[in-house]
Image (cartoon, grey):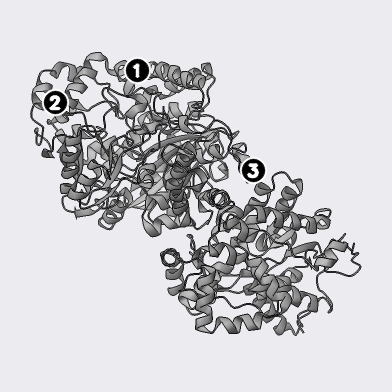
Amino acid sequence: MSELEAELRRVVRGEVGFDVTSRALTTMDASNYRRVPLGVVAPYDADDVAAVLEVCRDHMVPVVARGGGTSIAGQATGTGVVLDFTRHMNRLLSLDPETRTAVVQPGLVLDRLQEAAAPHGLRFGPDPSTHSRCTLGGMIGNNSCGSHSVAWGTTADSVRELDVIGGRGQRLRLGQGWAGAPQGLREVVDGELARLRTGYPELPRRISGYALDALLPENGADVARSFCGSEGTLGILTEAVVGLVEAPRARALAVLAYADEGAAAEAAAGLLPYGPLTVEGMAADLVPSPHALPRGGAWLFVETGGESEREARARAEAIVRAADVVDSLVVTDPAGQRALWRIREDASGTATRMADGSEAWPGWEDCAVPPQRLGAYLRDFRALMTAHGLRGTPYGHFGDGCIHVRIDFDLLTEAGIARFRRFSEELAEVVVAHGGSLSGEHGDGQARAELLPKMYGEEMVRLFERAKGVWDPDDLLNPGMLVRPAPLDADLRFSVLPREPVDVAFGYPADGGDFSAAVRRCVGVAKCRTTSATGPAVMCPSFRATGEEEHSTRGRARLLHEMLAGELVTDGWRSTEVRDALDLCLACKGCRSDCPVEVDMATYKAEFLHHHYEGRRRPAAHHSMGRLPQWLRVVARTRTAFLANALARVRPLAWAAKRVGGIAPERELPRLATRTFSRWWEGRAKAPVGGAGELVILWPDTFTEHLSPSVGQAAVHVLEAAGLRVALPPTLRLRTPSGGAGVTVAMDPVSLLRGRERVCCGLTYVSTGQLDRARAVLRRTLDLMEPVLETAAPVVVLEPSCAAALRADLPELLHDDPRARRLADRVLTFAEALERLAPEWTPPRVDRAAVGQTHCHQHAVLGDAPDRRLREAAGLSGELSGGCCGLAGNFGFEKGHFGVSVACAEERLLPAVREAGESDVVLADGFSCRTQLEQLAGVRGRHLAEVLADGLERAEEADGVARPGSA
């Protein structure tokens, strides 16, 4: 243990982490930059912060304050000690509705403050799109703004007082009238009054540089305001008094459509006299599916407020009438507004990929110009990009003249980096020519600080240096930011990655087969750090359960990045740090859909486990649950399910089996079906088979086959009632699928010797990283399915996780086999099959409320719109919750995962079920979800097919109709 680490552990009550994982998680923020810190400290209180500063000053080690870690200009990275305030110093200390103020700690997430203020009709004015995970300390450090800045200004406008510890340990209470100013600061300002009065551009989003003009006597000598936007370079914030604003009782959202972004930009400033709460702009390039928006090529999101919905709507409609638009939409429904705002908020992630899939990066993320100059600036900006052969799609706070953009810089080659520098230097001159600020929201950091002389001149920058010297004489607080900056093209995070593609099992088609490019998808937007799931969202259940960065999608991506870099994580695929971080990944695939850049951590986990255990002994759970289809087929062939169930009820035997199999002792072993679905099917096939319409192949997944055959039986009943002809996949090499008369069988001698084989999606092998075995299983499946693929028959899969595996994992794992894509394209969910193949069929009316949870794989890969429509047609009312059940296949059964599994279930699923009425239907299409409900809540969840089959039976009994093959 180093002397620095030992001293910190001696004086700090919070956590001190100098281990590889702690350091790897903080090498990057959401910028293009990377620095490896010596260690990370999560201070417990202000005394801890003071102690850290004293120890680091003795050792001349820099200190970097970090909130949520989402800074886009590189100011949350450093080579010394990083302070993480999100662990302990994250509380709302008080809220006073009378004075409309709140006292907060720096690690408090903005949404938590908003939730506390809302019952009083109040809110914090600034609201960046990262409001669900950004911290108040980070917002003060960057002087963040958000979409409502045209109404409520920047964070500096909402700051009243700040508790700060200076570079030499002085504790200061900053406020107006020079309150808390360090000794010597007033003398610096008094000697430069003329420069401070004339040296700053006049615009609402001037964030660049130090706000020394806030110290002018006519501005109240406001030291707290001046501190805002200093990016942790002047002092360490430990507490803040912030002002709140009155929230409108009602809101309306007017979405104004224009032909292009230039027209929208020209119109934005003209809307400000109408007193809108927001004037946000974005173009069609950033909207994957614009069907929810009025027709046009670009849009302004203009929000209005009022005492009533009628008043808010009237103000919105007045703006629509005043605007020269192609089309418009006014929404007053809160849910509809949230859905539209999600489109805008996800732009920061969507913008990181161009339409052709190529990468785009920050660096010039948030320049701002006077709003009246925005249209002209955008034209010059686009011309400059074209001149350099670059592409990007601007969006952002058009009403404030602040533009966000990600540009397709090549930051991997020397030539590309040189172009990045030339473009940056020239764009700075364009911004200044329009009277703008290099930063309009996210700060200068390393990305722009080098260029501040272009905006302010050399004399003003030297004044910034003098102010920094007063606050932090030893230059230990976030050095290299704002003054005496590091070069903008140094410390680029991509420089450490391998230049040649890594040998991998999956195809990564969206990333050109390059695993490094797949890992680079994570740009640090940190949507995975949201502390509460809302709506249908799933990502990231393990972070919400643990609150630990290493168990977030971003944290795991950071560790994979460092594994590829090989500097900090030095043992590559054998890394125990990466393995431990991935261990609590539920492979729910929520990040595949909820992450704005579609990071697919479930696939990365399977890839890692494949390499990590290659040629090594695997955990017992990989054999017991990873090879579950094999074991269950043995039981079925030997017809010993009854015996297995009986033995599982003998506690000592069950305990021993779980111990040997690496299964959590808290878990009950599921009961096996004594009659498999296929055996039921074979017996049923002897009776007349209903359905004479289009042929569908019903996939007998492992769970339906061996554990829930009732689901398969119900699906057959419903599909046939809808007029479809049902068949099962071949179990031998057949020319046509089984399930009807006249089938011709091509007898393969090898297959005959082996006996019947079963198709399998390979899910359990993939989730445990047994990818060689998964490929073999999937190739055998494709061999069996070949006669089906020669027909037009779709494949209906009842288990959502198996459907997702066939649709997504199969073509990515067997990317060299064209049959894989053909089968993937045939896969339909139960609801999709009914909607597409039997559009005229009317389901039975159930007319009951439904509760439960949309399967996480369904949400992430398959989509649930057909299910929603089918439930509505059947009279199943109510919305299913998002999130993850927590069992997630083998995850919740593995030893050591029970606590996290339960925590995930307790987040949304179990509360929803407990609050349900006695007559409510508990829907759970996934076997894992049903098992979790049964074991934790004593509730039987049902597949939608079972609910509809029951409805059909009731209708048939009422009509005196016998169910085909039911005898």
Disc 2 marks which amino acid?
A: Leu
Residue occupying the point 53% across, 45% down = 598
- What x and y, as percent, mark residue 327? 53, 37
- The residue singled out by tag 2 in the image is 216
Q: Gap between marks 2 and 3, in whole Å? A: 60 Å
Q: Is residue 295 above or below residue 805?
A: above
As helix, strand or loop, the secondary structure at mark 1 comes to: helix
Q: For numbered disc 2, what is the local secondary structure?
A: loop
Residue 481: x and y, percent?
Answer: 29, 28
Mark 1–mark 2 Cα distance, whole angstroms, equals 24 Å
Residue depicted at 40% across the width and 17% down the height: 425
Question: Which mark sits nearer the N-terminus, 1 or 2?
Answer: 2
Q: Is residue 201 left or right of residue 703?
A: left
**Dot placed on the residue nearer the N-terminal end, 2 or 3:** 2
Residue 740 location, quadrant: bottom right
Q: Where is residue 843 in the image (x, y as percent from the top left)?
A: 67, 69
Type of amino acid at the residue the image marks with label 1: Val
Query: Badge 3: few (under 14), some or many (20 or more) residues near its Cα, within 10 Å?
Result: some
Left or right of 781, for residue 672: left
Image quadrant in which you'd find residue 120: bottom left
Q: What residue type is labelled 3?
A: Gly
Q: Quick check: 738 above or below 558? A: below
The residue under label 3 is: 507
In-image side of 284 versus 2 (left or right): right
Which residue matches tag 1? Answer: 432
Q: How crowded is mark 1: few (under 14 residues within 10 Å), some or many (20 or more)?
A: some
Give the image location of residue 343, x and y in percent.
Answer: 48, 44
Mark yes or no: residue 534 visible: no
